[in-house]
Amino acid sequence: YRLAPGDIINVVIRGLNPLDKKLQISMDGMIVLPNLQPIFVEGLNLELIEKKLLEVIQIDDFSATVNVSLNAARLVPIQITGAAQQPKTIAVPAYTPFSRVISLVGGIRKDGSFRDITLIDSSNIEISVDLYDLLRGKNTFNDPILKNATRIHINDIGLTVAITGFVGRPGIFE
């Protein structure tokens, strides 16, 4: 998880000057700790921030330890269009996987495709998702993490086949 403006982190410092503080990353990607210069953390993960803080603090206190954890992730807008039960724009935590979002719009309509869902992120990178891999319990399902301003489009159902008779799962399949 890469931090960005709006994320809230917990910073715990033990040593000569202990500190236990919640900090929100500012719009310019900085955090400000008492008696220290602002530190740029945007795009870093928690481990790198710990190392960066420790380097600065150990100049005055070599016995110091630092622990950084995520308190609350920023909310990112996601637009869901196409064959969703309730197409709309919603805000979800930045670390939300794709598979958790479909239920927030009521699921997929009967005329919607489980096999042909398109994700387009803010940098126009397009990913095609096939939910059948998840529904069948395959370990190979790639569940993308949603980024800021991702657009999810549930396409119309494609070609189908009806299966009846003495079969394990009768029905209409895409």
Image (tube, rainbow, N blue to C red):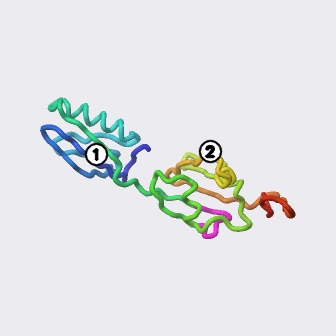
Using the image as rendered, state which of residue 55 and residue 29 is in the foreground. 55
Mark sitting on residue 171 = none
Q: State the image coordinates of residue 1 (x, y, percent, origin top left).
A: 44, 44
Q: Is residue 104 magenta?
A: no
Mark sitting on residue 139 = 2
Q: Amino acid at mark 2?
A: Asn
Under circle 1, the secondary element is: strand
Q: State the image coordinates of residue 97 (x, y, percent, origin top left).
A: 53, 52
Under circle 2, the secondary element is: loop
Residue sitting at 25 percent across and 34 percent down?
A: 54
| Image quadrant occupied by the C terminus | bottom right
Q: Nearer the viewer, mark 1 or mark 2?
A: 2
Quickly name the residue at label 1.
31
Q: State the image coordinates of residue 19 (x, y, percent, origin top left).
A: 18, 46
Specify the segment rendered in magenta: 80-87
Q: Dot 2: within a 10 Å radius of its alpha carbon, few (fewer than 14), some, or many (20 or more) residues?
A: few
